[in-house]
Amino acid sequence: MAQYAGVSFKRHGQIYFFTTSPFVLNMRDRVLVKTEEGIGFGEVMSLRDTLPEGLDAGTLKPIYRPATQEDLDIWQENQELAGESKKFCQQCVSRFGLDMKLVDVEIYFDKSKMIFYFTAPGRVDFRELVKDLVRAYRTRIELRQIGVRHETQMIGALGGCGEICCCRRYLRNFAPVTIKMAKDQNLFLNPAKISGVCGRLLCCLAYEKDNYADFQNRAPRIGRKYMTTHGAMKTLRANMFRDSVSVMNEAGEELDFSLDDWNAMLSPDQPRMAGHGDVSGEIPAELAALADPETRSAKRPRRAFRSQQNRPPRHEGDRQDAGRKQPERTERNEPHPRPQRQEARPPRSSSRPEAEERRDPRRRDRRRKSGTPRDGGQSPAPAE
C-alpha cells in the first residue's frame, strides 16, 4: 500500500502530498483534506512509497477521508457556481472599465472562499469590484493576479509542434528558461520560433539542456585551429545527434570525425596552435559554465574599506613620508577637540604693508604722494 498520495485541488494545478493512512486509495480517487484555508476537495494524481526530494514526512498532513457521493454533488454545484460567478465578475469588470482579463474562478469545497484569477498589464484598483462580489456571494473574495504562463496552463492551447502545450498536459511547476539554452542548442534566435503560445520562451528548451551541455564539454571549440596527428585542422561545426565534428585540413578538404576519433588524434605531447587549451581532457571554464543554465556573470567585487593608514598620500610632501607609519587618528575618541597647532613664522617686511594698504586705501594714497618706497629702500631723488 502506498504511504503518500499526491493531490491536486484544481485541474492541471500543483500537486501536494499527504499521508494515506488509514485509507487505501487508488489513482483518480476524489478525497477531502484539511488545509489552512479550510476543507479542500482534490483528486489523487500520484501514489508513492517514498517522498520526493526536499519533503519531510513529519510535516505532512493526513487525508481527511475519501469523497462520498454527497461530496461529489456538492463539488458539482460549486463548478456550476464558478461558471455563473465568472460571468457576473466579467460584467462588473466591463462596468467599471478595469484593464484586466478574468481567467478562471475557484471555489472552496465548503464555499468559505472564492478565488478569481486574472491577468493585467499593471496594477489594478479593484476595490469596488470586490465590494460587488462580496455583496453578491456573501463569502471571502480574493482576486489573484497570475502570469501569462499560468493563463495558458489554465485555458490550454496547441503549441507549434501540433501537440497540446506541455504546461496543460503534465507540467505542474514552471522551471526557469533562459535565452542561453537556445544559444547552446545552436537555434536561430527568432522570437517567433523559440516562443510559445504565452509569448515566453518555450518550456521544452530546458528538456535537453543537460545533453547539450555534456556534448559541448566534450566537443572542441568551433572556429579554432588544432594540431593533430594529421596536421593542423580547423573546426567548422559539431553535431550532437551524430556525436561528430566537422573540420578542414590544410588542403582545404572538409572531413568528419567522431568525437572519440578526434580526441585520439589530439596527442598530448603535440602543441596546439594559438594555445587554445586542452579540449580533449580538461574542460574549459567557458564550456563548464554552460551546464548550469542559471549561471550568470559574476558581479564585480566590492572594494574593501581602506583605513586612513592605507590611503595613499595626496600631497607632494606626504609622498616623501609614504614609507613611514602614520600615527592613528584619535579625534573621535577624545572628549574635547584638539587645539590647533600654531607655528612661529618669521614676518615678511613686504607682506604687512601691502595688507594694510589693501585694508586702508588712504594709506596707499599718502605713500604715493610722499614718495615713500614700499620695500624699505631709499627714496627717489627729487626731480631737478
Image: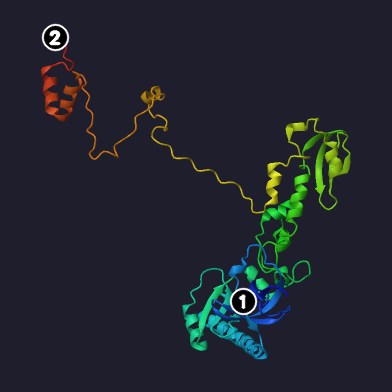
Which sits in the foreground, 185 or 197?
Answer: 185
Q: Residue at x 11, y 20 (%)?
A: 369
Please name the amino acid that badge 1 sits on. Pro
Density class for disc 1 (Cα within 10 Å; few <14, some 14-19, many ≥20) is: some
Horizontal side of residue 45 vs 380, given as left or right: right
The quadrant the C terminus occupies is: top left
- Picture layout, residue 51 above or below residue 37: above
Which sits in the foreground, 107 or 29?
Answer: 29
- Label 2, label 1: how many angstroms apart (C-alpha)? 121 Å
Residue that carries the numbered disc 1 in the rendered image: 62
Please name the amino acid that badge 2 sits on. Ala
Residue 106 image label: none
Question: Where residue 213 appears, x then y in whole percent?
Answer: 74, 50
Q: Of discs 2 and 1, which sits in the foreground?
A: 1
Residue that carries the numbered disc 2 in the rendered image: 381
Which sits in the foreground, 31 or 266?
Answer: 31
Question: Where residue 294 appears, x then y in whole percent?
Answer: 64, 54
Secondary element at image label 2: loop
Quarter assignment of residue 89: bottom right
The quadrant the N terminus occupies is: bottom right
- Picture layout, residue 26 above or below residue 304: below
Question: Where residue 303 appears, x then y in whole percent?
Answer: 48, 40
Number of numbered tags placed on the structure image: 2
Q: Residue at x 32, y 34 (%)?
A: 329
Secondary element at image label 1: loop
Question: Of the residues under marks 2 and 1, which one precedes in the sequence?
Answer: 1
Density class for disc 2 (Cα within 10 Å; few <14, some 14-19, many ≥20) is: few
Question: Where residue 198 appears, x then y in whole percent?
Answer: 67, 68
Q: Is residue 343 visible?
A: yes
Q: Is residue 97 visible?
A: no
- Picture layout, residue 242 above or below residue 88: above
Horizontal side of residue 374 vs 223, given as left or right: left
